[in-house]
Every structure is written in C-alpha cells, then in structure tokens.
Image (cartoon, rainbow, N blue to C red):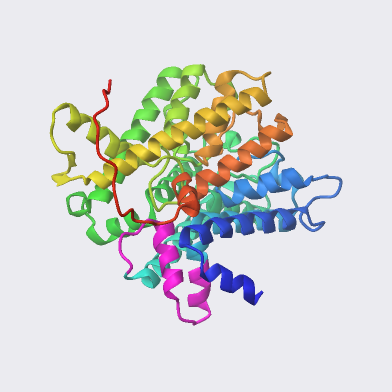
Amino acid sequence: MKRIFDLLKKQSPSRIIALGFGAVILTGAILLMMPFSVKKGVHLSFLNALFTSTSAVCVTGLVVVDTADSFTVIGQMVIAMLIQIGGLGIASVGVGLIIAAGKRVSIKSRLMVKEALNVDTYGGMVRLVRVVLAITLGFEAVGALISFIVFRKDYSPLHAIGISIFHSIAAFNNAGFDNLGGMHNLIPYKDNILLNITTDILVIAGGLGFLVLVDIVKKKHFKKLCLHSKVVVSMTAVLLLGGMFILKATEKNITWMGAFFQSMTTRTAGFSTYDIGSFSTAGLFAMCVLMFIGASPGSTGGGAKTTTIFVMIQALKCLGRKKSAHAFRRSISDENISKAFMITVLYVGILCTATFLICVFEPEYDFIQLIFEVTSAFSTAGLSTGITPELGIAARILLILLMFTGRVGAFTLLSVWSKDTTPNARYSEEMISIG
C-alpha cells in the first residue's frame, strides 16, 4: 500500500482524479453486486452493476435495470452515495474528509480541487470546499423536506423519507436517478406543481456551478457579478427559455410546465415527466443540442459547458466584424477562445465516432434514438427514449466509456497522457488557404 501511495503522489492532479473516479466506479459495482444490495430473485451481472455504478458516479441517470425494483434499501443507499461522490467530485470529497478528520490539507490536495472545480487561483481551497459542502447539504436538505410533502401523499412516512432524500440528492447532482419503480421516472408527477418547481430549482442550482452560486450570494446583483457568473447565468436563462419554446412548438401534447421541465432536464439532469420515446424527431434533435451544451463549469452537470459555447459564439461574431472578442464590457482572452474551439471540436469528434460505432452495434434502432442515447451518455444527461435496457454488451460498454469520459472531461483525460514540455525551437510558418 505504501508503494501505491508513493506512486500516486508522483502523478498529476488530472491523472489522480481520473484514477479516483475509476476506483470509485469499480468499488460501487462490487458493492451493488453484493447480496445485501440486490433484491431476492434479481440477477445482476457485473456489466449491469458496472453500468449502474458508472451512471451514478458520473451523475448520468441512464439505467439498464430499475433502481427501485432491483435494489434493496441498502443498494439504493449505495447508489445515492455514489451520486453524491460523483456530483461533489473525488477531490472535494477527499478534502472534505481530511478537514473532518482535523488534518492538514496538502498542496497536492489543493491542486486537485483547483483542477476539479476549474478554479483559477490556488488560494482559499479549504474554505471553498467547506462552502461547496455547505451549499450541497443545504440545497439537498431543503429539497428533501419539500419533496417529502409530495411523496408523503402516496407512500408511508418512512418510505417517503427515503424517496425524498434520494430524489433531492439525484436532482441537485443532476443525476436523474429515481427510485419510484416501474421505469416511470417522474411521469406520474408531471402535473404536480410543487415537485416540478422543487426539482427545477435543485437541478438549475446544481448546474450553475458552486463558484457561481457563491458569487450570487456575495454580490446579490447581476451587474456586480464576475464575467464568468454573468455568462453562466445569462446562457442558462437563454437555453432554459429557448428550449421550453422549442419543445412546446414541436410537442403538441406537452404543457408549458412540462416543456420547461424537459428543457431544464437537458441541463444534464436526466429526469423526465413525459415519455421521451414518444417525442418527435425535431424535439429529440433539439434536446440533443441542449444536452450537448449541458451545464456550466465547476457544477454537478456535464456537457461541453455553457461558457464554452458562449465564448465560441462571441469569437465567431467578432471574427466577422474583425473585432476582438468581448462580452459584458470585458475582453475574452485568446486562450479562452482557443480552448473553447478545441473542446467543441473534440466533443463533436467523440460524438460522431461513438454514434457511428453504436449504429454498427445496434442497427435495428432509428438513427435519432441512437444519437440521442450517445449524446445523453457523453453529456451525462441520463435521458433516454427507452432503449437503454435493450442494448447489447458492446453498446453498453461504449456508453460506460462515454459516461466516464463525459464526467471526467475529455480535455482532462487527454492531459492525463500528455507531458508538459516546452519546445526549444519552432517550425517556420507557412500560410494555408482556408475556406
């Protein structure tokens, strides 16, 4: 064990985070296969356990077996714990445990938190982790209390408490898991205003990002927010309302509340109050675009991120006008622009490759169903047209890899294998005709 710890100390923060997620996923899969986690008469293969664990840790919500019908109370507690760890991040949970134990947080741990939460400065990491944990527990506690009011009407008090806590954890961490049974998700509660609003708030808060939430609490006024927070809040509002209007236009049988909820859930939340499989091709394609964009950096959600798309759009707008990219009276750095384009191209490339592979693996399904499944897994959204449990082994392994890549971050995974080397010389430049 000492050799393992010594080896880990030499690794980069990105590599430790990736290995940490992998270790938690594997541990979760083993725990879910234990007799105390699975209900009597239910056979859970290792692949299905691994899929469920990956979906929970990567806060996705795609399932191959129903959570309530397949897992015992202990099994559901394991899934909730995996969701919590995945949402907070390995680094934040680790530092939180160190703080709780009263021990000193090392520089390496601070670097990991900086990497995980996309923070620019090294200072205040311990205080930030405390705030993150407090925000998480606060939102989840209030969400559980309000959810209990709804679920108490249909379940016994003890059962309602369990469902409420599970739902609140899954909602704030943008996981999309439900433990109501029957693979119905939240469809039975599509007309319940209180549960809809509560879930909306939890998901949106979790998708904004911890740094943005802290900034909002401190500044209390939009004009006083930092540029990052302004971009996140404005993009989130535009995508939520834009998605609502598009879904209302494409799906004739959906209510305005349902359209907003489904637009909200594409922030990589994974909940659904309507049968996604019955949606039109236009509606599914619109949801694919929204899922691809996803939540915001440093949040519990996935996707290419709202800031990435915002920076890219601003750069393209200003490029046509031959002006420097800017927003809210602030200039956008060339480094941000380059990174935004790199992430977008990388994510599109992964999606195209994965969609091609799943089309080869599952030729019996429609193309829109398959690209929806791939986008949902990679963005860690967790929405499905209902084909996930029917997919073959190869397709399930592909989705597992996509969920892992989407949660850890394709850019982070690439940096795991790269070495920071500064070249001593550069090649001479030569122009290429573009366009």
Q: Nearer the viewer, residue 343 or 369?
A: 343
Instruction: Confirm whether residue 307 shows in the render.
Output: no
- Whether residue 113 is in magenta: the answer is yes
Q: Residue at x 79, y 45 (%)?
A: 45
Q: Main secondary structure of the magenta part?
A: helix
- Whether residue 322 is in magenta: the answer is no
Instruction: Confirm whether residue 168 shows in the render.
Output: yes
- Residue 53 vs residue 322: left or right? right
Q: Residue at x 61, y 18 (%)?
A: 366
Q: Position of residue 6 (x, y in %)?
A: 57, 74
Q: Is residue 331 above or below residue 321?
A: below
Q: Is residue 331 above or below residue 88?
A: above
Q: Which residues are magenta?
A: 94-122
User: Which quarter of the rendering shows the C terminus?
Assistant: top left
Q: Position of residue 170 (x, y in %)?
A: 55, 50
Q: Is residue 423 above or below residue 359?
A: below
Q: Quadrant of residue 241?
A: top left
User: Which quarter of the rendering shows the N terminus?
Assistant: bottom right
Residue most extreme to the right:
41
